[in-house]
Image (cartoon, rainbow, N blue to C red):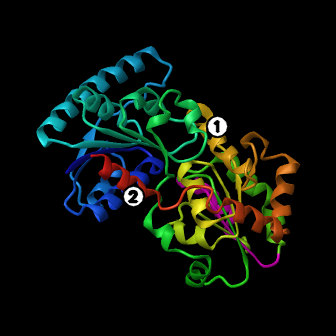
Amino acid sequence: MKFLVAAGGSGGHIFPGQAIVQAIKSLEPKAEFIWVGTEEGKERDIAKLEGIPYVPIRAWSVNNEGLIWKIQAYWFHSLMTLKLIRLLKKEKVDAVITTGGFTTASSLMAASILKVPIFMHEQNVYPGLGTRMFGKHAKIIFTSFPGSEKHLEGLENKIRLLGNPVRKEFSRLTYEKARQELGINDELLVLSVGGSLGSRNINDFIRSISDDIEVLDNVIWIHVVGMDYEEELEFYKDKKRIKALCFLQDLPRYLAATDLLITRSGASTITEISVLGKASVLIPSKNVLDDHQTMNARVYTDNNAAILIEDDRLQDQESKEIIFELLNNDKRRRELAKNSRGLAPQDSALKIAQEILESL
């Protein structure tokens, strides 16, 4: 049995694809895979790690407002679709699995034309354009959170709410083990992250409250400034309570050990919060399509599982008060952590793999 996996761009699309591949391998060791991704994306490294042949394609977003850009995007999309039609025929692919990103549109179009079975995974509450456009051609649409079905009218019979797959590291980690391995004793560990590239607004917010953090007892604060904001490190070099980094190499272990997480609300992040059972303050990014991070965050706030602060309200006094009230309120943090645990379905990758294999 041979699968084409289309996943590329951000980790939020790549890691679910990797998790599904690993799960299918565990159930069907003879299964073969081809990974389609962007020309320079980190998904190439993931495919290599999994021992999967990698096929790069050019992928352009059609969401840019410029007419010339749209013409180029559709032109390359057509060329890549033809390339993938040839690939699907040559490799005799049995099914296509997509987890999002710009590379999926051409894969979905090619599979639709050849009537190759399509299995789509949607990470966000509000489905992406690819899911909305090609959902009618899918055999199964796997969703991550309740509410997605409202935006996929007429496709309810294809939807399976099985959650968002996470990397194996997260299922193996416990709070106690992670803290022991990191050498953290009774201190309160706070982790603030603005995404892999970083966030100007979140960085400015942590700067603005840094003096108040410094006078706290028994707190370790790790702030990830992001790869685009390396200059921020200079500000924190003499801080005693705050450790600033461009990138946190061992993020899963630190997430497992943390007592309070301040972060964006991308699909992978909020799933990891649920799997690990963490108290969190979610700050949805406004620089995403369809404001999907706000919709993701609302699932948690509606279930008293997180607190939401709007990105443009970070400098308000109320935002500062929210953070420090949580630092001083063990009961409230435990409540948020308890409510977040299990909010997203567990063992998602294995359940998705089982559904795929059983339907072929």
Residue stretch rendered in magenta on the structure: 217-238
Name of the residue lying farthest toward the top? 67
| Label 2 environment density (alpha carbons within 10 Å; few <14, some 14–19, many ≥20) | many
Between 66 and 349, which is closer to the camera in this rendering?
Answer: 349
Residue drawn at point x = 36 percent, y = 30 percent = 137
Residue 112's mark?
A: none
Between 208 and 38, which is closer to the camera in this rendering?
Answer: 38
Position of 101 with respect to 55 (left or right) is right
- What kind of residue is marked 2? Ala
Between 181 and 176, which is closer to the camera in this rendering?
Answer: 176
Q: Position of residue 103 (x, y in %)?
A: 35, 37
Name of the residue lying farthest toward the left? 90
Q: Position of residue 345 (x, y in %)?
A: 55, 56
Q: Position of residue 176 (x, y in %)?
A: 62, 81
Q: Secondary structure at mark 2?
A: helix
- What kind of residue is marked 1? Lys
Q: Secondary structure at mark 1?
A: loop
Q: Earlier in the sequence, mark 1 or mark 2?
A: 2
Position of 341 with respect to 196 (left or right) is right
Q: Quadrant of residue 253?
A: bottom right
- Give the mark count: 2
User: Magenta stretch containing residue 232, yes or no?
Assistant: yes
Residue drawn at point x = 27 percent, y = 46 percent = 360
Label 2 sits on residue: 19
Position of 233 with respect to 144 (left or right) is right
Residue drawn at point x = 68 percent, y = 53 percent = 203
Q: Position of residue 265 (x, y in %)?
A: 62, 49
Label 1 sits on residue: 286
Circles 1, 2 touching at the beta carbon (< 8 Å): no
